[in-house]
Amino acid sequence: MQSRKKIKMFQRFNLHLGLLVLLVVSATHISYAATLSLTPATAKVSAGNIVSVKALVNTDGQAINTVSGTMQFPTDMLQVMSVSKSSSIFTLWVQEPSFSNTKGIINFTGGVPNPGFTGQGGEVMSVVFKAKKTGNASVIFSDSSILLNDGLGTDALAGTKPATVAISSSAQSDVPTINTTANSLPAKPIVISSTNPSQEKWYPNNSASFNWGAPEDITSIQTLFSKDPNAIPTVNYDSSVSQRTVNNIADGILYFHIRYMNSLGFGPVAHYKVQIDTVPPEKFTADVTTSEVNNTLVLNAVDKTSGIDHYSVQIDSDPAINVQNSSLVDGRLILPIRNEGNHDLEVIAYDKAGNHTETYSTYTSPATIPPTIAIYSADTADSHKSNLIKIIDNSDCQLASVGCSAIINRNQSVIVKGESKYPVTDINVYVQPEGKSVKMYETRTDENGSYSVTTDPLDTAGLATVWTQLKYSNGTLGPISDKVTLQIKDGLIVSTSKSLIYSLPFVIMAFGLLAGLVSLIYYGWHKFFGLQKRVRREAEDVIDETHKAMAMFRDELNSQLIKLEKMRTDRELNKKEEKLFKELKDKVDMVEDFVEKKIKKIL
């Protein structure tokens, strides 16, 4: 019975747990269905003609703010003639639509401000392709994304839809964007230009070519090339004409106008803008004015047609600097800091069509003023606090009585601060402890010319020299600041400990010498008296042994003397033998007496 209850309770628990998991998953799972598509899904065109394909976005009811991606196409079958964003829903472009007919790709990243875009069929851009050979060419999206306007950049892309361009050898083509329907006027023509592919750019050529594709039912075409942006074309052409080139175009902004006509009448007019500028900017001079510390270049080139786009400024053999004309204030540019002396200057002015005019001059740069330097305590982690304690600055270096030095504790960091006459300029800060290599810190002055660097802990007791130096944009170095000297000392406890540590070997040595001397004296004293006792004891042993040896020798000698005595009884000794016998006996007694006296004298 109890087991059945437990089983039922377990089953209920599993059921509740499953429902809870299902609710959580359902609550947290959000599906996105935004899509990118190409239209028409299938387009027909004959080889040599053009076809337009549009990229559209469907947000599925959600607000989006960014669409990015890459369109891919076969380079052997299609060639991009132009990419247009004139009808795009996007007004902000992180990456302007660009294409490569070599790689077969079109890249883009477009955005729209808050509150974003919500809807279906939002045009991203349109692409005009030229068909190169027969076959079916697929145009697809890759590496694409659709970001929601949710502040998180959530990717809502659920899928993409490609397009197929069916290319035939027939002269007829199906261009849906300009196709007409029964009982309607012709659609607006789609115009492309191989010489002036962008209507917003200036070009230095004085001729322009235009291409268009014509629907099947048109009977004639009218075109016009004029300065009027809203002109109505009046020059008639046969419907088979699909290209026109205009030569000897005067500089300025002009428009190519075209419209189709069918049995019902004329359709709307397409206007294609071209901007031509074949004349370089006017001659100008590069005037340089010098203030206390800076050289200012006056850039005043004039181009009456397209206007000045940018300048290229080169000093000596340094890399050239590109300066956008729109970034200048009153046409003035503060030149980068350079060493004192004369410098060659080359300035090239470019107009918006790429035409250019150059000028050359020489200017004199004034002496560079080195930065000031001050050392502050770095006991606090915030180097910008106003209560920092200044240790020393370069004004102290000008006082002979001060000696341009200050004392800090070992293992302490310092803050090197100062001012420079040159805002937003690189500065090198150098710290060199005595007997060690230089440590360099890199920083940059702010808009007011101030700089600040916190050093690593200075861990070596002794002297350390600190100075700063300007670093110019071309990598060369300017004059150095005054040098300040820091005396790096150990704290009281460390110093006392060091003194004890440094003197301890000498104390130990002295104590060791004293102990050794006492030990030597003690050892010598005991050795001396011990030796005396051993000598006395050994001498007594020698005396005993000597007595024994002499006794044995005497016995042996006596035995020989007895023999000589016996010989004397047998025969009479001569004088020589008698004298030898007597001397030998006396010598034995004398030797024994001498040895005993010497041993007793030692003892």
Image (spheres, rainbow, N blue to C red):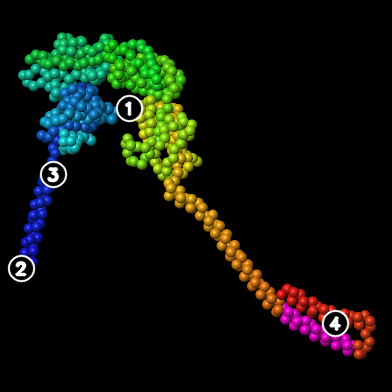
* Image quadrant in which you'd find residue 597: bottom right
Q: Which mark is residue 447?
A: 1
Q: Which mark is residue 585?
A: 4
Q: Which mark is residue 271?
A: none
Magenta-colored span: 542-567
Q: CA distance from mark 4 to mark 2?
A: 139 Å
Q: Is residue 386 left or right of residue 149?
A: right
Q: Give the amino acid at mark 2.
A: Met
Q: Is residue 134 above or below residue 530?
A: above
Callout 4 crowding tier (Cα within 10 Å): few <14, some 14–19, many ≥20: some
Name the residue that disc number 3 marks.
Answer: 29
Callout 3 crowding tier (Cα within 10 Å): few <14, some 14–19, many ≥20: few
Name the residue that disc number 2 marks.
Answer: 1
Q: Give the amino acid at mark 4.
A: Lys
Disc 4 or 3, which lies upstream in sequence? 3
Hey, which residue is sitting farthest front in the picture?
401
Q: Is residue 14 left or right of residue 198?
A: left
